[in-house]
Image (spheres, rainbow, N blue to C red):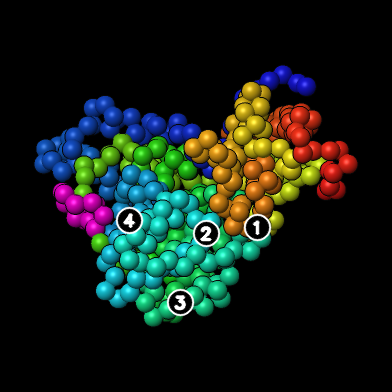
Amino acid sequence: MGEKRFVYMDHAATTFTKPEVFEAMLPFLKDRFGNPSSLYSIGGEGKEAVEAAREQLAKALGANLEEVYFTSGGTESDNWAIKGTAFARQKKGKHIITTPIEHHAVLYPCKYLETQGFEVTYLPVDKHGLIDPAEVEAAIRKDTILISVMYANNEIGTIEPIPEIGEVAREHEIPFHTDAVQVIGKIPLEMKKKDSDVDMLSLSSHKFYGPKGVGALYIREGTEIDNYMHGGGQEQKRRAGTENVAGIVGLGKAIELAAENLENHNEKMKKMRDSLLAGVLEIPSCRLNGHPEKRLADNLNFSFEYIEGESLLLMLDQMGICCSTGSACSSGSLEPSHVLRAIGLPPEIAQGSLRLTLGDENSEEDIDYVLEVLPETVKKLRAISPFYKPENACEK
């Protein structure tokens, strides 16, 4: 085996902050520290910077300035969209439609609303994690007040038919929210055109090479939604709290760069992804999770039979490879990914999952290194597995 190197392949969890983004933020962490709500000059500088970032974000989304609201990240944006809409429209009904493969930032607010008298329908997905728009329409009732379906799944990379689902929502005059945290800089958005049936869209800066702790929620003008935080008059009096100026500036610069580089980024990611995919599938008893074609250009999720994901993750980390697994250790017991269970994987296979998500600084040499290390690591783990016998290895 060659020399150990450092390979980061967990960009769906977080990306690094690009140097251009850091440079744009730096003045607002030092000399230009004024509160944007203040009247003196350094406060005005902060206010101007926030509004400039709002213009960058609105341009990237194809949205109007007044439809863009800064938040602390994707989790807050999802919570605002789900709970804000539910409480604003509860006199019209208490039924919500979503899916079982959503991020917990959508699922947990829905579970909370169920304790408050709301009813939630969790639509099934197919073996690739796809939602059928016809099933969305069939689930609509007279008291349905919100539909929320993620744009692309963070674990398995499947891209949902958002325009078609949005069309269904629009025909029935039901607000439609999509968690688009994973798609910024990967799928072109135009809220006034292609995505015109989306009423709310969540995003998070640290998924596209911006800083952590800042995100945004697109809210179409006229959408009925409660304010999320109460206090000051920031964000058009809808989201109180002193603005995270440096973070917002970083988000603006990051999304500007992402929008400019989208085509080249996808081309590079797809080339590396396909090389990695072909190599990993050479490993016996391995399967790709998610749609084989309708998936993000930078996402791969595999299940390896007869081994456990955490062990694989830790051994890869020892070899300098950073990635993630679809199972999570909770309260001393292994809980398989809710996404993998929703697409029909049995627990013993779901627990042997590995997610590899690529980014701007990955190279073909990184792919080669992973394809050198991963098969040997899987082989070592299977050698000590009580469930694995060589004759059980299935064909590719």
Region of the chain picked out in magenta, as a range: 227-239
Residue located beneath label 2 in the image:
100
The amino acid sitting under disc 3 is Ile
Gap between marks 4 and 1 measured at Cα: 31 Å
Q: Residue at x 74, y 31 (%)?
A: 381
Counting residues from the start of the chain, the first of labels 4 and 2 encountered is 4
- Residues at badges 4 and 3 in contact (C-beta under 8 Å)? no
Residue located beneath label 1 in the image:
344
Q: Give how far across and how far down residue 343 sits, in percent.
A: 63, 58
Residue located beneath label 4 in the image:
80
- Residues at badges 1 and 2 in contact (C-beta under 8 Å)? no
Gap between marks 1 and 2 measured at Cα: 12 Å
Location of residue 281 by image quarter: top right
Q: Residue at x 64, y 37 (%)?
A: 309
- Viewer-proximal residue among 164 and 18: 164
> Which disc number belongs to residue 171?
none
In the rendered image, residue 236 lying in the magenta stretch gets the answer yes
